[in-house]
Image (spheres, rainbow, N blue to C red):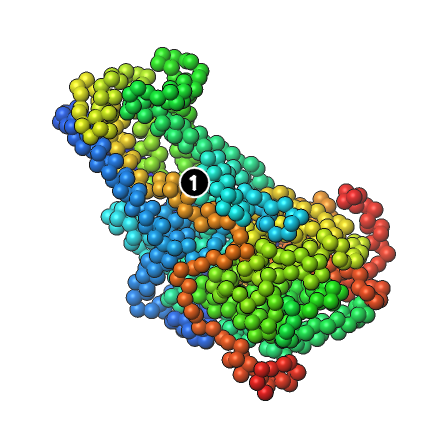
Amino acid sequence: MTILISFVTIVMLILLVMAGVGVGGWRVLFGTVIPYAAIATFLLGFIYRVTLWARSPVPFRIPTTCGQQKSLDWIKPSRLDNPHTGLGVVGRMALEVLFFRSLFRNTRSEVREGPRLVYSADKWLWAAGLAFHWSFLIIFLRHFKYFAEPIPAWLLTIEHLDGFFQVGLPVVLATDLIIVAALTFLFLRRVVDPRLRYISLVADHFALFLLLGVALSGVYMRYFAKTDITRVKELATGLLSFQPVVPDGIGLVFFVHLFLVSVLLAYFPFSKLMHMAGIFLSPCRNMANNNRARRHINPWNYPVKVHTYEEYEDEFRDVMKAAELPVEKD
Amino acid sequence: MAEAIKKPEELGRVQFQPSRKGWMDPHVDFRRGTWNYAAVAETLRYLDQPNPRKWSPVDDDWKLPEGWEKIILEGLRDRLKHYRSLQIFIDTCVRCGACADKCHFFIGSGDPKNMPVLRAELLRSVYRNDFTTAGKILGKIAGGRKLTVDVLKEWFYYFYQCTECRRCSVFCPYGIDTAEVTMMARELMNLVGLSIEWINTPLSNCYRTGNHLGVQPHGFKDSIDFAVDELEELTGVRVDAPINKKGTEILFVAPSADYFASPHYYTLLGYLLLFHEIGLDYTWSTYASEGGNFGLFHSAEMMKRLNSKIYMEAKRLGVKWILGGECGHMWRVMHQYMDTMNGPADFLEVPRSPVTGTRFDHAASTKMVHITEFTADLIHHNKLKLDPSRNDHWRVTFHDSCNPARAMGWIEEPRHIIRAVCNHFREMPENTIKEQTFCCGSGSGIGTDENMEVRLRGGLPRANAVKFVHENYGVNLLLCICAIDKATLPPLLEYWVPGVEVGGVHEMVGNALILKGENERATDLRGQPYEPEQVEAEETEKTHA
């Protein structure tokens, strides 16, 4: 059901843009107005969400420690998995953000007859997650060629490396294949694994379908429905320079691609995709475990009702004296 | 209780049990053995907690106060504003499922709502319904659920089936910590008077008498005196154990179980021998006679209320620094909360070992050092005369307690001590120790009897790893540095892996420590006689060399 709702939503979005551009001829709407609105929503929404998060204070220093603490001189601390300095935290975050350190630990547990528990390394999620995110990043960077003239050298290098295998014409870019494969895997595991199937919400499938839609429409354009790149570039640079034009001769599939990207951008700040920013603010990862060395301040720390020693002694003075325990007042 | 529990082979047959209607349909079966008794009205009253009344989780009517939904939702709004952790943990989860089979309760029960992701979704779904635009419009499609009595019952059931052990947080790509979510959910439930007896009774005891067990000052002194007498019988040495003594260098605070429960008691004997042998200038306190802090399992405010006495007492007694005993959650409070809540401890000095001169700079602000750090330093500097062969009747393994492992990172300190005082030490499999350690299944205030089935299920992964070293290496003693472990692991092991006892690291220190002027020890600290057969057993066990 969750899958169906997500899928139908995506199909309807695609039909909407096809009807809008193909039948209605609303090229300006889908070529400029919606992309602008989407970018604005993305930027404002993103800032809004991050501000909202940042506004909540961090009352306690609660890092999850995953290795030896810094204590005695002769015990080697785990500087990255249990950082005690700011630099260590930067290292830990870098490992987390760039290489998904925590997911790399993933194991799979199984209770066999006996009972006997068996654990095995399970790197599939890590591999697919990493493959998807890195491909997405590279593809995202590659798209700057539509906005820049002349195309900078680093962009050409990326594209060159991406097309390393020199297969097909136009050259098949590895990231195009990887992103589709990774997204397909991520979707299939949500369908095949009973636990994942159980926890998956509409939002989970929707995000995957949307990303797949973006990727597949892009792939279709590049390899099958050869699109007039010069005109696309005209449109893109127009958007960027705030002098939007929608040249003729751009195929329908481009509008589908652009619209899905717009939906992705507008949806982003209000969805779980915000984990992109959230990871940087996670107190369990971005704080140093130097709790006892440096005092952490809670901005809303307030006085509480306590049971003082005087009250305690008042209640127990007699028994304390009988037990020959020292007291403050006789 | 016992007759209700199935046999291990049966209980260990775990199946994934998703509900046909999906998880969003709230449903809880308060089956015997799976839930905790409700807090007694009197304890709620003593602690100024709302809605004191007589009720039971199996009742249909939980006697919630008028407008309880609003109280909880407002409480949630308030906490979102005060805790970035909560806001981030609610917003960033992508339901990747990496946490699912990392939870001991899920592994042992197969109940999908024990997957950390779904445990958090119980709260998240209410948030979506009432705090997000999509949830307000789309409701269930956006993953939103209205806060109903059934949802609240589900919260009560599952947030008291989380031991706040943080194992899921180790594996989560965003570090989402279910302990934090559970803490918040419990705070919200407290607002309408939903708490459990096993948490609230210790709380009110501790608030009044200074310790969870409700031991009054004279009872405390009796316990310590008894231990001193017993040590004299065992070793021939009479140790000094000052109580409420002003002007000493160190205040020593241990979990109360150490002086009132077994096998904790043997750890206490170990402390006393060690302090005597190095001539430590220290004192116990009756007012601060509890290191543990069940406030951690209740609310930040309660944690602070109970924790306040540590610094207040250190100040009153005029000590220089504080040393703490073997305890798990106690140390999460001391390490991650105490200084922030009740500091600054500017009236204390940076802890320095009077024996080795080592300055514990990593505790420069909090001014509190854990006994394994202290003892590891002593051993490293060769300040103790040890005879590890006095522990040769034990083949030991070490259970990293959740909080020391995942909230501090004491991995090496206890191991350094164990290697010095025991000849036969074997680790459990790598993914069940250190930061990946499995909880005893009874932490965070749920280590009581009425929920034994849940505890046994939750303890299965830990027990199974013990079973592995028991069967393969003849391990017969599980060492740990946590009072809750020492209380709850014995019944767990008796059920899943009979033949393995539970002990503390400083019990082993006490056995191995050669005291000046001691008699030859006829028994270990448990009173078990040393027998010549030990030598024979040794020969069959070559692997440890």
Q: Is residue A198 above or below residue B159?
A: above
Give the x, y percent position of residue A56.
36, 54
Q: Is residue B449 visible?
A: no
Residue A68 vs residue B230, the one in the foreground: A68
Circle 1 residues within 10 Å: few <14, some 14–19, many ≥20: many
Would you say A309 lies left or right of A46 here? right
Vertical order, B59 against A310 (above or below)? above
Depth check: give the residue in front, B454 or B29.
Answer: B454
Q: Quadrant of residue A322?
A: bottom right
- For the image shown, how many numbered marks are present on the structure? 1
The residue sitting at 50% across, 40% down in the picture is: A91
Residue lying at the far left in this picture: please name it: A24
Q: Chain of mark 1?
A: B
Give x and y (percent) for residue A28.
Answer: 16, 28
| Nearest to the observer: residue A72 or residue B505 | A72
Which residue occupies 70% across, 75% down? B225
Residue A175 in the image, given as x and y percentages of width and height? 40, 24
Mark 1 lies on a secondary structure that is: loop
Residue placed at 47% from the left, 46% from the top? A285
Image vertical order of residue A119 relative to residue A221, above or below: below
Q: In this view, which residue lies farthest toward the bottom?
A: A330
Looking at the rendered structure, the kind of residue marked 1 is: Cys
Which quadrant, please, contains the C terminus of chain A?
bottom right
Q: Residue furthest top?
A: A169
- Give the residue pinned by disc 1: B96
Residue B333: percent from the left, percent from the top? 52, 60
* Residue A13 relative to residue A198: left or right: left
Q: Residue at x 28, y 43 (%)?
A: A45
Q: Is residue A71 visible?
A: yes
